[in-house]
Structures are given as C-alpha cells and as structure tokens.
C-alpha cells in the first residue's frame, strides 16, 4: 500500500523516543517565535503532523507549542493555515484553549480554521452557538471589519447546514433569509476596486466607478448577478455570488415551514386578502410585504429568471460560455425548488422553462442543462398540463444514442433516472421502451455505471419487454463492439494504405450488413433479428477488445437480476417463452469462452428456479427440452446447461407435477436420453472434444431411473444398461472416461440405481419422494410427537454431561 520510503518514515514517526520528541517540540517552538517562517518551519510542521497522525495514541502538545500553532490559523500564508489546522485536529485542545470565535475575532475565521472548529464541536449546542456568532457577524457592515470576513462566513454556514441542519433556530433562519434577499437582489451595480485603468492622467472623472457589464460586453441594465463581469467586484457583489452558490441548498434544507412559523405567517397576512397576496407575489415592488422565506423565494425566482435571460447573450470567452451553462443548470434547479415549495409559481415559471427548452433542445452541447429541465417537466408538467413528449424523446432518445461516450452526462442521466424511478414508471411510458438506448451507456463504460443499472434494471422488466430485454442483455458485448466501430467509422478513412484492415469495420460500412448493426443501435424496443450467427462471425475479431471484455463481465450479474425480477411480473406463458430463449441463445453468444461459460451457468441456475416454481413448464416445453437433451453434441459443448435440462426432465416429468404427463411422453423422453447415454458411453468423444463430465453421465443415469420408476415397463431397459456398464468397466479403462476415480464414481452410482430398481415401489419413493417428505416440518409440528422426543433427548444429553465421573 505504501512505498518502502513511506513505510520507513511512518515507522520512524511511531518509534520516536519521548526525549527526542521533547527536543523536537522545543526546536519547533523557537522556529515559530520568529517573524518569518521559511522552509524549515514548513518541514517541521509536516513532520509534527506525521508524528501525531502515525501514532494510534492521542498525543498532547506542550501548551506553548499549541498556542503557537493555533496562531498560525490566522497566518496570511495558506500553506501554514492548512498545516496548523491538520496538526490541531490530531491533538485534543488544552483546557481553555478551544477555538471560541466571538464578535471581535470572527473576522479571523477562514475555511481551515472553520474545519478545525467544526471538528472540535462537541454538541449541537456548540454548533448553534457558532451559527449565532457567524450570523451576528453578517449584520455588520463591511467597513467595520476586514473585507474577507463576510466572504468566508457563508461557506462555513453552508458546511454546518450540511452536517447539522437542526442547529439553526427560527430566528436564525429568518435573519439569513433576509440577508440572502439583500445580497441577491440589491448588490451594487458598479464595478469594485480596480475598475480604473490608472496611469499618469488619472483624474477624479476617471476614478468614478464604472457600471457592471454583461458577458457580451454591453452595459448591464438590471441588477447584479453571477453572470455580470467587471474589472473588480465589491464585497456585496462577492456575497451575491456566495449567496447564489448556497441558495439551492438553503431552499432544500428549509423548504418546509415549521408550525410556529406557519402560524406567524398567517397572522402577518391575516389582514391581506388572498387575491391581493397572489398579486403581491407577482410583482417585485410589493414583495417586501411577504414573510422572509416567501420573499426569498420571490427574489430567487427573479434572480433565476434574469440568469436565464443573460444566458442568451453571446459570451466572448469559452470559460464564460461554460459559466453560462453551469448557471443555467443551477437556475433551473432553483426554480424547481421554489415551485415545489409554492405551486402558484409553476404557472409563472413554465413559459420561461418552455422557451429555454425550445432554444437549447437542438444543441447537444447543452445536454447537461436539459436534465434539470426534464426534472422540472417531470415535477410540474402534469399540473401545468403541458406536453412533455418532446422532452422525453430527447432525454431517452438522442442523449444516450449520440452522447453515450460522455461520462459526465451518463452519470447525471443515470442519477436522474434513479432519483425519479417511481415517477418515470408511472408517468413516462417512453422510459421502459427506451432500454436499447439506455443500455448503450452500460455497453460503453460498464465498470463505471454497472451499479446504476443494478438499481435500474428491475424497473425495465415488464411483461411486454422481458423477452427483448433478455436478448438485448445477451447481446451487450456485441453492442459494445458496435459502438466502438461506429466511432471509428466516423473518424477513420475508408481505406488505410499499408495498415491492417479491420474486417469488422468493413462489415459495419457494408450496406449488406448494415441492418444487423442498426438493429443493435436501435433506440426503442420492438425489433427482432434472426441472423445472430452472422453478426457474431462479423464481430469475431473484436471479441478480445478490453471494452468488450469488460462489458461481457457485467452481463451475468444483470441476468441474475433480470430473472429474479421477471418471476414477479410474468405469467406461465411468458416464462415458457423465456425457457425457449435460454435454450436457443445458449448456442448464439459472442465467442468469448469465459463469457459463454458464465452465461450457461446463469441459465442453468434459473432454469431450475423457474421449473421449481412452475413444474408444468416442463410439460409445456417438453418438445423443445427433449430436442435439446437429445442432441449428443450438447453434452460436449454445453455441459452445464445440458446437465440441468436432463435433471429437470427427470425430476418434473411426472404425473404428480402435471396431470398432463402421459406414459407416452415419459417413454419418448426416456428413449431420447437413453440414446444419448448409450452413444457417449460406447464410443470415444469426437475429435477436439474432451470426455463427457462424470456429472453428465450420472445425471443421465439418474434421470432414466426416475422415469423408469414412473413407468415400470422401462425398468428392464435401465437395469440392462446398468449391468452392461458394470461389466464393461471391469475390463479396466474405457475410451469415454479418462480418470479412474471418475469411472469408479459412475459405476458406484449405477449400482445404487440398479439396486433401487429391483424394488420398483421403493425406487419411486426414493427417486421421486412426495413433497411432504422432501420438505419435512416435523420439528415444528405440534400435532406430532417429534418435538417432545427432541426435547427429551436434549434433556437427557444435557443431564448426562452434568453427571460427575
């Protein structure tokens, strides 16, 4: 985990002697007594932090040293602030030396001192006291203290709100809401210090503050916002920026008004008619009549409206254009918050949001802005009775189809889906049918988003999408390769002289194969394909690409989730169809050996579960199951799933499981399995294949014995085969089994079955026991004597242990 050098330093720090440590303390105190601090001081502070943090015991610094380190928190050098804060967090404060910032020294508070202060807060009361001091400092004018004091206060308050939102009282909330209103709406509209160009001819006229400007260079004609520019900014303009940065967090934390506050607000507005309140909230000039929190909502609404208007201006710099996008995201999110709090604002906000969507929807560079807009439509579209189809066509259509390789957008889109899963399932029909598009995000960057799809996949499984979704999951490695080919096709020349030509890339560009790749790149559910074998051949050379391998590794996990979910939403007819899909697709997978093996293992596991839940599936799909089990080639190429298909046939092809199971059906199944078992035990495996696994042979023998126990006419045929098997193996090794121990296990199993079949009644009870035998509850049934006997035996054994020898 650590390099050798790092481990050596940590070991030295842990094993330092007390005498040496005291000398080091004294030397550091002398260094900190100087007026200037050089590299030696910084190195010593770093060593002190290592000594304190490397020990599992808490060390206490000498009072003089702790006092000197504490004074560094107000140093103008940020590196010293960081080191002193880190050192003091590793040691307990001395009695009377805790950080207690009051009205006089709160101006010294910076982010590093605040981090230390928060770490030393022992209770909610401590945080509440700190909040009170910070809020009192906000009431002071900037001329009464250093200009940087206020700019540090809001971030510190925001941090406290994150960790303990209950520490603010109602008075605190009211005060902060009023201050935020002032900073957001009434900041200076002239540039701060540094606006003057200076020079020899600087005079009184040139020193007059210039007005703030918009991003396109025009003079601003409205109030200051974060998108205004100038050569310098005043303190209240900086507070405007800080206020906007924490506004959404504040609204989310305190969007619900307490009962007392609600009563007070009602009293304040008791003399105002409801229609007048509605009119007042619609105009900024009368918003002062509103209670503080409602007034803050109104000013937040106006601020965000202005930001949206400013975002339409042409920025001269790319950084300013990026800032416009970031502010649009935040503005739309804040508008969504205020509309959630006050539904009457929805009708005032929607025209602006709708116009913004119309302006930006054709430009995919604003994709990250579209997600908050989609959130707004989802939350308020039904109330405003607007058509949201174009929004969802963009979010579930173009975004994943064209921007699947945008990692940030993928993260935010999947986060949006997870946060709104229930609403999307209920109100957005496009969601469940867009899984071919959404899975492109998984196919492109599987490790980064697989956790998201673990949560999302169950919501995509419905009776109408289950079959196609299963096919799509199995084709995810093919989709991953196709996405890479799509990007390469767009950026690489059609022919590369002297270079190695990718056959798969040529196939992607070939019109005759274009339909296969377009099927994988489809945007909605509803299509089918019957040339998967051809597609796998075309993609054979890309099967070892890292992106394809990573994608293939996630498919088994998702298949488990799929089958666990589909059993809760599907009827027997659909489950029967899924069984057929599993049998069919077991031989139609991209040629990645490890991937094929894992898929067969998943299929085997869930085939057993489906048949256990619905045993009648075996009779319903007996023809297809027998066709699969009767193919000898499957013994060598699909050992896992073949073994489980044979076991399912032997276990559930019974009248006790389904009354439709006839003697004729049992006989046909017996003959198919008998032919396979005879073939694999009478000849060597085909060229290139290994000997059949002992589990396959024993499962076939057990299945034949079970079937024969249900149709006694078949018992002589099984007994004859088992006796021949014992006779053949006496001669030594056989061609179909290379391991002597495996051969002994097979013969032993055969002798057990032969012995059972000599008594057909016993064989049926042992090989096919009734449910009350396989799942006994005797130890819980109070109507039988078993619980009493168990308790008696327990008492006897306990009493015998207590008898002295």
Image (cartoon, rainbow, N blue to C red):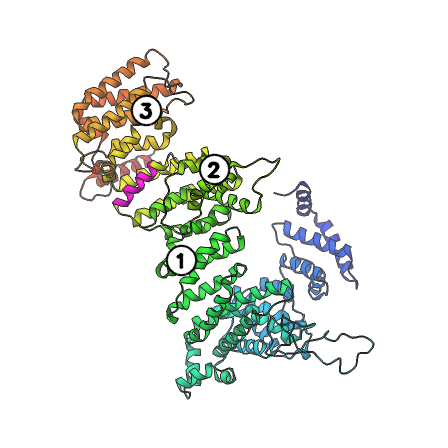
| Residue wearing tag 3 | 697
Residue located at (48% from left, 81% from top): 291
Q: Is any part of residue 805 visible from this angle? A: no
Q: Earlier in the sequence, mark 2 or mark 1?
A: 1
Q: Is any part of residue 447 visible from this angle? A: yes
| Along the line of sight, the residue nearer the viewer: 500 or 436 | 500
Q: CA distance from mark 2 to mark 1?
A: 35 Å
Main SS of the magenta segment?
helix
In the depicted structure, whether residue 721 falls above or below residue 209: above
Expressed as whole percent of the image width and height from the top left, the position of residue 96 reads 64, 67
Of badges 3 and 1, nearer the viewer stands 1
Local SS, label 1: helix
Quadrant of the image containing the N terminus? top right
| Residue wearing tag 1 | 421
Dot 1 alpha-carbon crowd within 10 angstroms: few under 14, some 14 to 19, many 20 or more: some
Local SS, label 3: helix
Expressed as whole percent of the image width and height from the top left, the position of residue 271 reads 41, 88
Seen as rendered, the residue at the extreme front is: 511
- Asked whether residue 578 is drawn in magenta, I would say yes
Answer whether labels 2 and 3 touch (C-beta < 8 Å). Answer: no
- Asked whether residue 753 is drawn in magenta, I would say no
Expressed as whole percent of the image width and height from the top left, the position of residue 153 reads 61, 71
Answer whether labels 2 and 1 touch (C-beta < 8 Å). Answer: no
| Along the line of sight, the residue nearer the viewer: 414 or 138 | 414
Q: Which residues are magenta?
A: 572-583
For residue 520, side relative to residue 774 (left or right): right
Label annotation for residue 539: 2
In the depicted structure, whether residue 723 falls above or below residue 658: above
């Amino acid at each position: 985990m650590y390099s050798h050098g790092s481990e050596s330093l940590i070991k030295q720090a842990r094993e330092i002697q007390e005498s040496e440590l005291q000398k080091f303390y004294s030397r550091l105190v002398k260094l900190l007594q100087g007026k200037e601090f050089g590299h030696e001081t910084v190195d010593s502070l770093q060593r002190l932090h290592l000594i304190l943090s490397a020990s599992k015991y808490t060390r206490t610094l000498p009072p003089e040293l702790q006092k000197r380190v504490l004074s560094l928190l107000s140093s103008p050098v940020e590196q010293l602030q960081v080191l002193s804060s880190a050192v003091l967090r590793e040691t307990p404060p001395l009695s009377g030396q805790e950080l207690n910032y009051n009205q006089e020294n709160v101006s010294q508070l910076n982010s590093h001192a605040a981090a230390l202060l928060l770490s030393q807060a022992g209770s909610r009361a401590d945080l509440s006291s700190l909040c009170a001091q910070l809020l009192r400092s906000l009431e002071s004018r900037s001329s009464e203290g250093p200009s940087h004091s206020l700019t540090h206060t809001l971030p510190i308050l925001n941090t406290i709100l994150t960790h303990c939102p209950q520490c603010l009282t109602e008075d605190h909330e009211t005060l902060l809401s009023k201050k935020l209103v002032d900073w957001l709406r009434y900041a200076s509209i002239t540039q701060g210090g540094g606006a003057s160009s200076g020079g020899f001819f600087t005079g009184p006229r040139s020193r007059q503050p210039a007005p703030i400007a918009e991003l396109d260079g025009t003079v601003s004609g409205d109030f200051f916002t974060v998108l205004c520019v100038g050569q310098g900014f005043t303190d209240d303009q900086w507070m405007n920026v800080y206020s906007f940065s924490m506004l959404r967090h504040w609204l989310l934390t305190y969007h619900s008004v307490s009962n007392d506050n609600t009563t007070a607000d009602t009293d304040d507005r008791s003399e105002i008619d409801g229609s007048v309140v509605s009119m007042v909230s619609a105009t900024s000039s009368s918003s002062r009549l509103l209670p503080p929190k409602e007034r803050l909502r109104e000013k937040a609404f106006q601020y965000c409206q202005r930001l949206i208007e400013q975002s339409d201006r042409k920025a001269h710099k790319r950084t300013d254009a990026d800032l416009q996008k970031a502010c649009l995201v935040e503005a739309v999110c804040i508008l969504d918050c205020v509309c959630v709090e006050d539904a009457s604002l929805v009708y005032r906000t929607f025209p602006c949001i709708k116009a913004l969507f119309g302006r930006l929807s054709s430009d995919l560079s604003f994709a990250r802005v579209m997600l908050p807009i989609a959130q707004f439509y989802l939350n308020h579209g039904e109330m405003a009775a607007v058509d949201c189809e174009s929004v969802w066509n963009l979010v579930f259509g173009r975004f994943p189809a064209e921007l699947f390789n945008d990692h940030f957008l993928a993260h935010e889109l999947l986060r949006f889906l997870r946060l709104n899963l229930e609403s999307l399932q209920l109100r957005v029909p496009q969601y469940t049918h867009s899984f071919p598009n959404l899975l492109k995000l998984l196919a492109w960057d599987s490790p980064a988003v697989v956790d998201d799809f673990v949560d999302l996949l169950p919501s995509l499984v419905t009776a109408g999408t289950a079959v196609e979704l299963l096919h799509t999951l199995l084709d995810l490695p093919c989709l991953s390769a196709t996405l890479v080919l799509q990007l390469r096709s767009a950026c690489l020349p059609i022919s590369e002289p002297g270079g190695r030509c990718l056959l798969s890339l040529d196939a992607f560009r070939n019109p005759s194969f274009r339909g296969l790749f377009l099927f994988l790149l489809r945007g909605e559910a509803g299509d089918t394909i019957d040339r998967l074998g051809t597609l796998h051949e075309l993609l054979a050379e890309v099967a070892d690409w890292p992106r394809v391998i990573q994608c293939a590794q996630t498919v088994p996990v998702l298949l488990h989730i799929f089958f666990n979910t589909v059993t809760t939403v599907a009827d027997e007819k659909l489950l029967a169809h899924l069984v057929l899909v599993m049998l069919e697709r077991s031989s139609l997978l991209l040629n990645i050996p490890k991937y094929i093996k894992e898929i067969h293992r998943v299929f085997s596991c869930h085939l057993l579960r489906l048949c256990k839940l619905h045993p009648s599936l075996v009779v319903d799909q007996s023809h297809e199951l027998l066709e699969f089990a009767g193919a000898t080639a499957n013994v060598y190429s699909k050992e896992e799933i073949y073994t489980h298909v044979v076991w399912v046939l032997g276990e559930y092809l019974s009248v006790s499981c389904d009354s439709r199971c006839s003697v004729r059906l049992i006989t046909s199944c017996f003959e198919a399995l008998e032919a396979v078992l005879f073939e694999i035990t009478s000849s060597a495996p085909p060229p290139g294949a290994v000997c059949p696994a002992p589990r396959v042979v024993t499962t076939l023998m057990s299945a034949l014995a079970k079937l024969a126990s249900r149709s006694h006419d078949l018992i002589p045929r099984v007994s004859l085969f088992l006796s021949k098997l014992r006779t053949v193996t006496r001669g030594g090794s056989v061609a179909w089994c290379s391991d002597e121990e495996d051969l002994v296990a097979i013969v032993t199993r055969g002798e057990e079955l032969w012995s059972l079949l000599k008594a057909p009644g016993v064989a049926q009870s042992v090989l096919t026991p009734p449910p009350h035998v396989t799942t006994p509850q005797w130890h819980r049934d109070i109507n039988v004597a078993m619980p009493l006997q168990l308790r008696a035996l327990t008492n006897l054994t306990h009493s015998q242990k207590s008898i002295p020898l």
